[in-house]
Amino acid sequence: MPFKDGDSKKGANLFKTRCAQCHTLKDGEGNKVGPALHGLFGRKSGQVEGFSYTDANKQKGVTWDENTLFDYLENPKKYIPGTKMAFGGLKKEKDRNDLIS
């Protein structure tokens, strides 16, 4: 299933409760336990300056967009075997669509 527009308000709440402890969104906020996500779309995996990625992330070579992120967020460890991301994923398509929106 490809990405479909979701509810951005619900997505913002999902980010706050499921992602913000490890990631930032705004320009200049920097990396946390996970890489900064500002400017994610159009960037290749494993490319945020100053973040220590696994070889799996660096070598995946995926270019992030709505559809690749939609697939990744279902099960990050399956999408990039060897990633150090501890997040188990969002199984519900609606949640992934909302978060990306």
Image: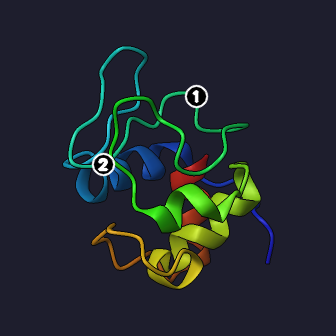
Q: Is residue 2 left or right of residue 29?
A: right
54 relative to 23, above or below: below
Q: Which mark is residue 4?
A: none
Three-letter code, disc 2: Gly
The number of numbered badges drawn on the structure is: 2
* Coordinates of residue 36 in the picture (x, y in percent): 39, 35
5 or 91: nearer the eye? 91
Q: For this view, does 75 lie left or right of residue 86?
A: right
Q: Which residue was labeled with disc 2? A: 34
* Amino acid type at image mark 1: Gly
Name the secondary structure under disc 1.
Answer: loop
Looking at the image, residue 49 lies above or below residue 4: above
The chosen color scheme is rainbow
Against 82, residue 42 (above or below) is: above
Between 12 and 50, which is closer to the camera in this rendering?
A: 50
Q: Position of residue 59 (x, y in %)?
A: 61, 61
Asked if marks 1 and 2 touch (Cβ < 8 Å), the reply is no
The crowd level at tag 1 (other Cα within 10 Å; few <14, some 14-19, many 20+) is few
**What percent of the width, then of the height, locates residue 48?**
47, 35
Residue at 40% from the left image edge and 61% from the top image edge: 54
How crowded pointer 2 is (Cα within 10 Å; few <14, some 14-19, many 20+) is rated as: some
Per the model, the C-alpha gap separating discs 1 and 2 is: 14 Å
Residue 94 position, x and y percent, is: 59, 70
**Circle 2: element type:** loop
Q: Is residue 51 above or below residue 65?
A: above
Instruction: Kindly identify the residue that appears in the image at 54 percent across and 40 percent down.
Output: 47
Write the residue at 19% across / 48% down. 21
Q: Which mark is residue 39?
A: 1
Q: Is residue 33 left or right of residue 78?
A: left
First reached walking from the N terminus: tag 1 or tag 2? 2
Q: Residue furthest right?
A: 2
